[in-house]
Amino acid sequence: MKNFRFSTLMLWVGFAFIYLPMFILVIYSFNASRLVTVWGGWSTKWYVSLLDDRQLMGAVWRSLEIACYTAIAAVALGTMAAFVLTRVHRFKGRTLFGGLVTAPLVMPEVITGLSLLLLFVAMAQLVGWPAERGMMTIWIAHTTFCSAYVAVVVSARLRELDLSIEEAAMDLGARPWKVFFLITIPMIAPSLVAGGMMSFALSLDDLVLASFVSGPGATTLPMEVFSKVRLGVTPAINAVASLILLAVSLATFLVWFFAHRAEERRRRAIQQVMEESQAAIHARPEAKPAH
């Protein structure tokens, strides 16, 4: 009983450690005072002032756009890399390829950002692209390290799959592309969603890489917040963070809701098939012994 109480207490302490700062952030976004740490009453003027701050709102939409593009590209590239690592057994350079894929996970972002900056500068001098650094270069940089996270997550899921299901479908005449889209993709869908959400969050939160590869007119939200922090934080930053928390929480809930509903439909379909199979077996007449 004591162990149970201690575990419950530590669980609530962990929740408080994670979510209490977010709750305080939301509360202080309604602060009427211009000072973040001094409470001056309730007010929504900072949310209204966001509409007039074109620079900050531009950084918000730019970061969200880059994060969406990064999540899509990272899921596509990371999934292909995961299939190569887990399904292509005749690939002699698989070990080296796996090391190259996961290298961004252990490499400091400063090194990655500096190397990408030198790469973009060299390419601009040699082939004339990119002509200037901006959203495209930030998107490429974010996709580079987010793909590694997706590859690791999807690879772990692919190693747990039962290959007999795919082999049975192919034995019944299904083409490989049909097996991939109708059987493999639904089974690894949770890992794809997890990898996409992780890529979205990492891209939205990144400051180091974006600082290296961005250019004029391509300031992201973390860069904008960091520049404002050095001059003094206003509750407007808290209001932006609160809106992003609300949007991310709503998106997470919708993903969970639709995934849960799809899983329930799949379970009911499997249960219905099993019940129909059992009913067919019981309805089958027993063979009479030959005299």
Image (spheres, helix red, strand yellow):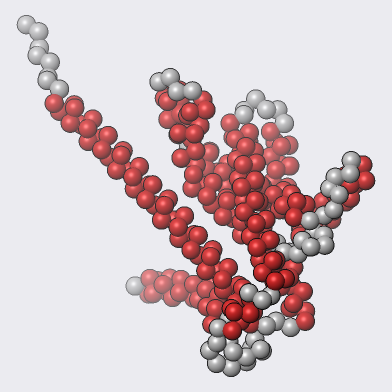
Which quadrant of the rendered structure holds the C terminus? top left
The answer to whether residue 287 is above or below residue 213 is above
The furthest residue to the top: 291
- Residue drawn at (70%, 28%) of the image: 92
Count of labels in the image: 0
The answer to whether residue 56 is above or below residue 176 is below
The furthest residue to the right: 125
Give the x, y percent position of residue 212.
82, 59
Which quadrant of the rendered structure holds the N terminus? bottom left
In front of the other: 51 or 275? 51
The answer to whether residue 151 is above or below residue 210 is above
Compared across the picture, whether 57 is left or right of 209 comes to left
The answer to whether residue 12 is above or below residue 38 is above
Give the x, y percent position of residue 221.
69, 67
- Residue drawn at (31%, 38%) of the image: 270
The furthest residue to the left: 291
- Residue drawn at (54%, 52%) of the image: 194
Give the x, y percent position of residue 224.
73, 70
Q: Quadrant of residue 38?
A: bottom right
Give the x, y percent position of residue 225.
71, 73
Q: Is residue 96 visible?
A: yes
- Residue drawn at (49%, 59%) of the image: 252
The furthest residue to the front: 52
Q: Is residue 145 visible?
A: no
